[in-house]
């Protein structure tokens, strides 16, 4: 492992750097992130947290910084709600890590053996999916609280490096490839989850959906020479306005999504970009009921608002190679500047981006 890191990043006159040069690459690459192990609590070794913490300390010793390359070292974190794992890692290894991972997948049924269809589901199954996805906020909050005790300066990032929806594979496909479609339901899961990460950006420093192409909640699907983007892709594109922006705190009151044990109908996050523009992302998680939004902008003024929306008449809508644009963002006009802020009608099952100037 140490040789591999040296091969990639060293600019010295050393055996591994010279081997890289011999193989055709003169200048070293940058290696910004290095994770020591993956799912070490399960398929990565079935380790106890104490044993993994010792192994992290051992192998991290040999992850060297060569030639000015600074590696952000990530320790394997918890499986879902294993808070003891986080307690142990923060106690035994926190001084040697820069990040701690977290894995959580949204499974509508809660049953790994029967996850449900990606494209054929009922309103009850939609609501069950939102309830499972909403749990991400609880997990981030509780793991962050444990990390805060040992790291009140929030030096260590919580890296949610596997998340997304997981359904039964598409009929007729190889089960080992985990190929599934992505519908409007997945767009709402993506939007709600990204809002959660935005609102916890003091601790969440990385969040990687699993995965980008053809597997699980993918943003791109391919078939030989053909390619399409999914509703999840469109949500990521809409939320890109939050990158490198400053979080603006929000408070929200919303009715409960029926049958979900206190999941609010609306999800929200906001940020201000370098130009001063205020960007607000909203998700109406209800598959049937619109939401009337009355937004009070405290300490800010708005003279105009521009909106975009991702929605469809059918909550199972998805893009296919025959209809690659069955669902895509459109202009949103049901928003108005008001005396203290703005008002809007947020349609059912929709993701909305509001840009305020």
Image (tube, rainbow, N blue to C red):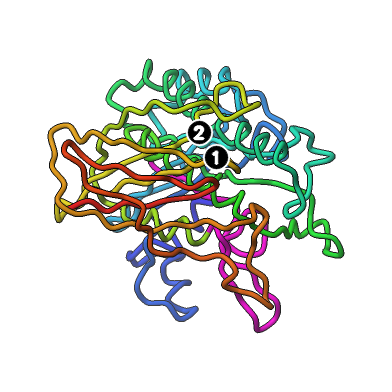
Tell me, yes or no, whether the two marked residues, 1 and 2, touch with CB atoms within 8 Å: yes
Residue 70 percent across, percent down from the top left: 32, 50
Q: Which residue is mark 2?
A: 265
Name of the residue lying farthest toward the right: 172
Question: CA gap, disc 1 to disc 2?
Answer: 9 Å
> Is residue 35 found inside the magenta-colored segment of the image?
no
| Left or right of residue 32, residue 328 in this image | right
Residue 103 percent across, percent down from the top left: 59, 37
Q: Earlier in the sequence, mark 1 or mark 2?
A: 2
Residue at horizontal 52 percent and vertical 39 percent from the top = 59
Residue 21 percent across, percent down from the top left: 42, 76
Residue at horizontal 35 percent and vertical 45 percent from the top = 344
Residue at horizontal 64 percent and vertical 46 percent from the top = 165
Q: Which residues are magenta?
A: 205-232
Q: Which residue is mark 1?
A: 289
Count residues near mark 2 (Cα–Cα under 10 Å), then give few for <14, some for 14-19, many for 20+. many
| Left or right of residue 27, residue 117 in this image | right
Residue 310 percent across, percent down from the top left: 48, 57
The one nearer the camera, 234 or 306, is 306
Q: Is residue 50 visible?
A: no
> Is residue 230 found inside the magenta-colored segment of the image?
yes
The one nearer the camera, 104 or 22, is 104
Secondary structure of residue under mark 1: loop
In the displayed structure, 10 sits above or below 108; it is below
Residue at horizontal 57 percent and vertical 22 percent from the top = 85
Give the foreground label among 1 and 2.
Answer: 1
Secondary structure of residue under mark 2: loop
């Amino acid at each position: 492992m140490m040789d591999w890191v040296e091969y990639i990043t060293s600019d010295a006159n050393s055996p591994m750097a010279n081997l890289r040069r011999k193989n055709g690459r003169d200048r070293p690459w940058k290696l910004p992130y290095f994770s020591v192990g993956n799912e070490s609590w399960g398929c990565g070794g079935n380790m106890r947290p104490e044993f993994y913490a010792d192994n992290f300390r051992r192998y991290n010793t040999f992850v060297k910084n060569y030639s000015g390359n600074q590696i952000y070292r990530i320790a394997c974190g918890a499986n879902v709600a294993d808070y003891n794992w986080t307690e142990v890692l923060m106690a035994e290894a926190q001084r040697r890590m820069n990040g701690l991972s977290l894995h959580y997948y949204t499974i509508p049924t809660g049953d790994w053996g029967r996850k449900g269809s990606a494209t054929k589901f009922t309103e009850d199954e939609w609501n069950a999916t939102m309830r499972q996805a909403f749990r991400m906020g609880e997990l981030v909050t509780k793991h962050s609280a444990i990390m805060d005790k040992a790291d009140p300066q929030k030096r260590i990032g919580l890296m949610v490096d596997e998340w997304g929806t997981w359904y039964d594979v598409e009929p007729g496909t190889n089960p080992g490839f985990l190929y599934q479609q992505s519908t409007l339901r997945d767009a709402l899961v993506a939007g709600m989850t990204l809002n959660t990460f935005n609102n916890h950006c003091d601790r969440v420093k990385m969040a990687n959906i699993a995965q980008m192409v053809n597997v699980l909640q993918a943003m791109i699907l391919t078939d030989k020479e053909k390619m399409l983007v999914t509703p999840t892709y469109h949500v990521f594109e809409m939320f890109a306005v939050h990158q490198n922006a400053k979080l603006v705190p929000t408070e929200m009151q919303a009715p409960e999504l029926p049958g979900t044990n206190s999941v609010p109908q609306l999800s929200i996050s906001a940020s201000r970009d370098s130009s001063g523009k205020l960007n607000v992302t909203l998700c109406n998680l209800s598959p049937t009921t619109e939401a009337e939004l009355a937004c009070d902008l405290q300490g800010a003024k708005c003279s105009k608002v521009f909106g975009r929306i991702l929605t469809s008449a059918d909550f199972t809508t998805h893009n296919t190679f025959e209809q690659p644009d069955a669902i895509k963002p459109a202009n949103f006009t049901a928003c108005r500047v008001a005396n203290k802020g703005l008002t809007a009608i947020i349609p059912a099952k929709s993701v909305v981006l509001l840009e305020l100037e």
